[in-house]
Amino acid sequence: MAGAAQMEARQVLTFVEIQNIAVHPIQADYIARGSLAYEFATELLQTPIQLMRISNAETQIVEILEHLVANNVAAVHEDAPLKFVELVQLLRVASFESIEAIWAQFKAKPAFRRWILDAVPAIGTPVAVRFLKEKFLAGEVTEAEAAEALLAAVQLVRADLETIQLAATLVFHPRIQEIPALREIAMLGY
């Protein structure tokens, strides 16, 4: 055994008897408090919060994207984390159509594309999952990009009826079923 310790344990059990006595519940006075009903919150997610004035979310998103791309070429700029949090917060306020318009404007530019695909999952709303699903099924996002973004999106999104329905359509879509990594991500998210 080369110096390793070895241990052996033994136990002897003896059968004594069987009791066939029903367990009676505690007799106590309970106060009727109504039924249990869970309500999903509908307020805007503000997890990473940066106090900022939002006037036109779409133009502010474009400005922040341009700032992030311009200042993070060789190394990460010192204000990149703050700008990223602002970008996420603005994307939470933006509508699905606004996010699609921004994507259409920048999808051909790799630097912008990377920032968008990093920020969209952090939104944490069903809009993020819907956006990623539609872009992958349309062929605008590669398998690797979809896997990375969906992994974060399904973990960060709040579980509500809309999200569960989106996850179900992802799980059972033939294109997702063909790719083992995406299928597993969709199943874990569901």
Image (tube, grey):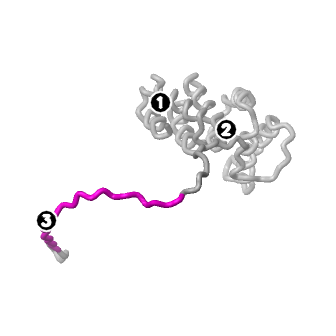
Going by the numbered disc 1, the residue's amino acid type is: Val
Query: Element at badge 3?
Result: loop
Tell me whether circle 2 and circle 1 mark residues in contact (CB < 8 Å): no
| Image vertical order of residue 188 relative to residue 138, above or below | below
Q: In this view, does 73 lie to the left or right of 20?
A: right
Task: Report the magenta residues as a range.
Answer: 7-29
Q: In this view, does 59 lie to the left or right of 182?
A: right
The answer to if 137 sits in the magenta stretch is: no
Q: Residue at x 77, y 53 (%)?
A: 50
> Closest to the observer: 82 or 41?
41
The answer to if 17 sits in the magenta stretch is: yes
Sequence order check, earlier mark of 2 and 3: 3
Q: Which residue is drawn at 73% across and 57% down?
A: 78
> Closest to the observer: 83 or 137?
137
Q: Where is residue 112 in the image (x, y as percent from the top left)?
A: 69, 37
Where is mark 1, residue-wise?
A: 171
Query: Element at badge 2?
Result: helix
- Magenta stretch mostly in which secondary structure? loop
> Closest to the observer: 69 or 86?
86
Q: How many marks?
A: 3
Query: Element at badge 1?
Result: helix
Going by the numbered disc 2, the residue's amino acid type is: Ile
Residue 15, disc? 3
Where is mark 2, residue-wise?
A: 116
